[in-house]
């Protein structure tokens, strides 16, 4: 070294120091926590702890790591600590740590953690629940340190989701600290550590005030004969749990048969379970029958987690035939349960309807009693399979849908109204409420409904199609994708004539089964849009009634287009306060009442129809035709 000049030696030392600093900085930047740890965590005594890729709130930044060992720098206190973190579950982290000290090598610092060092637990906040390790129902005894409470027996019941269960504690008169209460346990995580099995959950009951009361840790073991020993922590940690029989509260669970089991096998009828999956018309709910046909689960596919809304277990069949079935079921919604009455109707092999009692009963004998189940007033739920089969449409023929000339800012004619139920329609001539925004026209301002709309029913070779043909006249150019031609037309008051473009629109529907009500006065038809032009419903129920009875002119036919179900007690008159869009096409032309919010996405319409003849005839002489809808007849004049 003596040969190296002093200045060169100093420069060399600086370069070495700079290289070491850069290497340390590069190494420091590579210390990151697993990505799945990022988020908000609960720790008893600390509450909310946020972890990101490089730091833990209240502890500091990671500067070095080796497996599960992390060197954390606390810049605020200018000290370092070793933290050893174990991931027990996606929702549970446990760690031990040293005191915050002067900087030492990671390995040296971590050696200071002793075996009896405190163990800290962190539980992921807003965690996705995990299936519980034991499946109710159970009866159980419990002990809170003052003796075992055995009689009356306590009970654990299932909820609709397998990550939840309901604990029904009973008070024993001879045991101090025993009390009657109901607690819901939501399982978040469970894991095995050596010979011990742990469970972390959240308890919901009337005494819970915050997360310190809500989070609890359990240690459990399974014994022969479907028994479980379970010990619960006294706080929101996993400390102090030495065995499944030692804890702040201990339980002994005993597996029992479902209390709604009638002692015999009960299965839903074969015609009902020939398809294991059914949907409501708007696909808001799906009905799943279990492979053994004894359980029905209802889920909501639109929900982000597609949670089970309810579960119905067949208890016994009160009556069954080839087209109807009356059953008593044990119904669970969330963690509340009871007996309910269900009536299923077979409309087609791919179309069924359901009526269900509104109230649950505590005994199966009361479920289908007359005071609890009245089919005359209970609503219907219409269900179809994923791929319903086409069926021949009722009332084959060609019809004219009469529309008077009315200037309006809606879609071009009734066909688009049916094809686009999500559109809100307004009558441009109607007064606009003060402060409300004007409606957006889907047609140019100078467009009018001039010609009547034509409806053909079953005129295709398969006889399973309904087609609405609409012509709209506009003074401007035609819209893309629609046929047009130049024609002269008169305004409604006959004061002038203008030359305009005619826009022709076709909307088609396929028929998939129809039936009449018990009175024979109303017909229900399930249809599917053959080519949806917008985000309309997947299925429709067309409800057809005598127009005179529905509040319209004598001889008209009232048609309601429903998107949720074939409701029996739907509204037939336009009322502004109703949350739905109504179109009444009578002698005064379309009178459209709109609302920002539509009830169940349904649209109701009424219009007069005049038959033009059979599918094969272009025109026929004037005759009288009776269109039979159930037992109701409508006099329509043929042209």
Image (tube, helix red, strand yellow):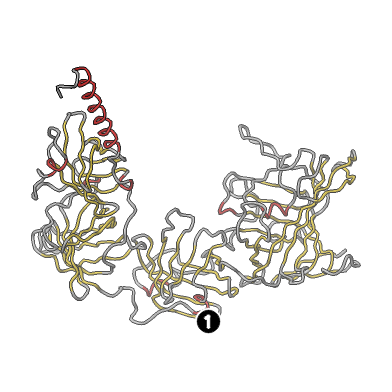
Q: What quarter of the picture does the N terminus occupy? A: top left
Side of 583 where 255 appears, left or right: left
The mark tally for this picture is 1
Q: Which residue is mark 1?
A: 321
Identify the residue at image location x=36%, y=82%.
264
Quadrant of the frame with the C terminus: bottom right
Q: Residue at x 65, y 64 (%)?
A: 527
Q: Position of residue 358 (x, y in %)?
A: 45, 63
Give the side of residue 325 with respect to residue 347, left or right.
left
Question: Can you give x and y, in whole percent of width and height, for residue 186 in the image?
Answer: 29, 56
Is 506 placed above or below 617 here? above
Classed neighbour count for the residue bearing mark 1: other residues with Cα under 10 Å, few (<14), some (14–19), many (≥20): few
The image shows residue 630 at horizontal and vertical percentages of: 69, 72
The quadrant holding residue 222 is: bottom left
Which element carries disc 1, helix, strand or loop?
loop
Seen from the viewer's position, the closer of residues 371 and 471 is 471
Q: Residue at x 66, y 60 (%)?
A: 529
Q: 360 or 266, which lies in front?
A: 266
Out of 353 and 246, give the one closest to the viewer: 246
Q: Is residue 349 left or right of residue 477?
A: left
The image quarter in which residue 201 lies: bottom left
Q: Residue at x 34, y 53 (%)?
A: 128
Relative vertical location of residue 116 with respect to residue 377 in this rendering, above or below: above
Q: Is residue 190 left or right of residue 547?
A: left
Residue 237: give x, y in percent of width and height.
18, 50
């Amino acid at each position: 070294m003596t040969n190296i000049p002093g200045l060169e030696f100093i420069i060399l030392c600086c370069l070495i120091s700079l290289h070491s600093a850069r290497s340390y900085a590069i190494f420091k930047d590579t210390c990151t926590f697993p990505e799945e740890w990022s988020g908000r965590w609960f720790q008893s005594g600390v509450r909310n702890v946020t972890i990101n890729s490089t730091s833990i709130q209240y502890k500091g930044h990671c500067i070095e790591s080796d497996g599960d060992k992390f060197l954390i720098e606390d810049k605020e206190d200018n000290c370092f600590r070793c933290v050893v973190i174990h991931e027990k579950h996606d929702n549970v982290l446990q760690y031990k740590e040293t005191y915050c000290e002067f900087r030492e090598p990671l390995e040296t610092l971590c050696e200071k953690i002793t075996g009896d060092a405190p163990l800290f637990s962190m539980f992921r906040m807003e965690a996705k629940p995990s299936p519980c390790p034991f499946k109710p129902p159970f009866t159980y005894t419990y002990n809170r340190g003052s003796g075992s409470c055995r009689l009356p027996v306590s009970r654990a019941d299932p909820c609709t989701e397998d990550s939840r269960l309901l604990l029904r504690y009973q008070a024993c008169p001879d045991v101090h600290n025993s009390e009657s209460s109901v607690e819901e346990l939501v399982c978040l995580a469970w894991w095995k550590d050596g010979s011990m099995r742990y469970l972390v959950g959240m308890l919901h009951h009337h005494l819970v005030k915050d997360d310190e009361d809500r989070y609890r840790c359990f240690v459990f073991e399974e014994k022969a004969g479907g028994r479980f020993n379970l010990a619960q922590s006294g706080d929101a940690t996993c400390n102090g749990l030495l065995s499944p029989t030692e804890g702040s509260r201990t339980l002994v669970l005993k597996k029992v048969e479902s209390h709604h089991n009638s002692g015999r096998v009960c299965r839903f009828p074969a015609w009902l379970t020939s398809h294991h999956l059914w949907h409501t018309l708007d696909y808001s709910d799906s009905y799943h029958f279990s492979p053994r046909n004894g359980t029905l689960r209802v889920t909501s596919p639109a929900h982000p987690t597609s949670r089970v809304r309810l579960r119905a277990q067949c208890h016994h069949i009160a009556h069954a035939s080839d087209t109807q079935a009356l059953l008593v079921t044990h119904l669970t919604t969330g963690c509340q349960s009871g007996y309910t009455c269900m009536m299923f109707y077979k409309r087609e092999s791919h179309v069924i309807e359901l009526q269900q009692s509104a109230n649950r009963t505590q005994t199966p004998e009361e479920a289908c009693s007359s005071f609890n189940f009245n089919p005359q007033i209970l609503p219907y739920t219409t269900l179809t399979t994923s791929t319903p089969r086409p069926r021949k449409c009722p009332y084959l023929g060609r019809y004219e849908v009469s529309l008077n000339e009315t200037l309006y800012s809606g879609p071009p004619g009734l066909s688009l109204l049916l094809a686009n139920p999500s559109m809100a329609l307004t009558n441009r001539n109607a007064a606009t409420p003060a402060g409300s925004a004007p409606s957006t026209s889907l047609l140019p301002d100078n467009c009018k409904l001039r010609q009547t709309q034509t409806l053909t029913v079953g005129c295709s070779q398969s006889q399973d199609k309904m087609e609405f043909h609409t012509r709209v006249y506009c003074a401007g150019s035609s819209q893309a994708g629609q046929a047009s031609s130049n024609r002269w037309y008169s305004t409604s008051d006959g004061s002038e004539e203008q030359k305009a473009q005619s826009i022709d629109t076709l909307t088609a529907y396929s028929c998939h089964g129809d039936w009449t009500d018990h009175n024979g006065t109303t017909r229900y038809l399930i249809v599917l849009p053959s080519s949806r032009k917008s985000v309309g419903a997947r299925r429709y129920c067309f409800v057809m009634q005598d127009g005179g009875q529905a509040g319209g002119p004598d001889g008209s036919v009232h048609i309601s287009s429903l998107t949720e179900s074939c409701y029996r007690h739907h509204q037939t008159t336009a009322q502004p306060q109703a949350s739905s869009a109504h179109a009444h096409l009578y002698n005064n032309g379309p009178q459209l009442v709109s609302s920002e919010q539509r009830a169940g996405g349904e649209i109701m319409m009424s219009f007069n129809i005049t038959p033009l003849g059979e599918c094969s005839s272009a025109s026929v002489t004037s005759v009288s035709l009776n269109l039979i809808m159930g037992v109701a007849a409508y006099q329509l004049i043929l042209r």
